[in-house]
Image (tube, rainbow, N blue to C red):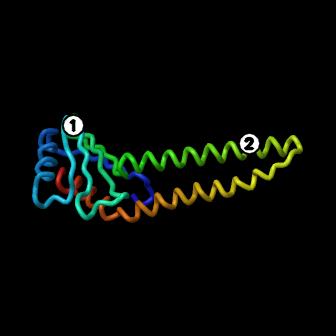
Amino acid sequence: MATEIRPRIKMISQLSVEEVENRIANYLGSSENLCKGWVRDGHAIICSEGNERHLWTPQLNLQIDNIEAGTELRGVIGPGPSVWTGFIFAFSILGFLTFVVLMWGLINMSLGNDSSILWFVPVLLLLIGGTYGMARFGQSLSKKQVLQLNEFVYKKLN
């Protein structure tokens, strides 16, 4: 789990889909609950609540499916949609800019023109690395919450 940007959960429970949904709903409505979220029609979203919440707070998207062996639970723990979309957008823009600057500089170099624009490539690569570093930093800030979500799935829904 330490090397994954968005850790995945996959397990088979002997409980029925309805029982799993009821356990999630009961947990979300209980006083011991440290999370908020919802469950309906074989899908649940669960995330931390209250003082624990910050920009990097992870959420668990859980798909609950009925299979022959019981109930399959598949989930992804990751940042909220706005944070995830922001990082994907930043990586896309920086990657595109790196490609354009590199091609522009190499074309100018092959034509014998000034290719000093190539000096921006290392800067853009540093920005990509910095963005990745921010994502890893945010992930380390939310490690405790990721473990809470994992523990909830494996202990309460098994």
2 vs 1, front mark: 2
Q: Give the secondary structure at mark 1.
A: loop
Residue at left 39%, top 47%?
82
Question: Would you say 79 lies left or right of 32 here?
Answer: right
Tell me which corner region of the image, top left, top right, bottom left or bottom right, holds residue 123: bottom right
Residue 113 at what x, y percent from top left?
87, 45
Residue 42's disc number: 1
Whole-angstrom CA distance, mark 2 to mark 1, is 48 Å
Number of numbered callouts drawn:
2
Report the disc number at residue 103.
2
Q: Left of 109 or right of it: where is 30?
A: left
Q: Residue at x 67, y 44 (%)?
A: 99
What amino acid is at disc 2? Met
Image location of residue 148, percent across then percent down: 26, 60
Q: Quadrant of the N terminus?
A: bottom left
Amino acid on which the number 1 mark rests in the picture: Gly
Residue at 19%, 42% (x, y): give it. 39
Q: Residue furthest right?
A: 112
Residue 33 rendering spot, x and y as whole percentages: 16, 58
Q: Secondary structure at mark 2?
A: helix
How many residues crowd around disc 2 within 10 Å: few (fewer than 14), some, or many (20 or more)? Answer: some
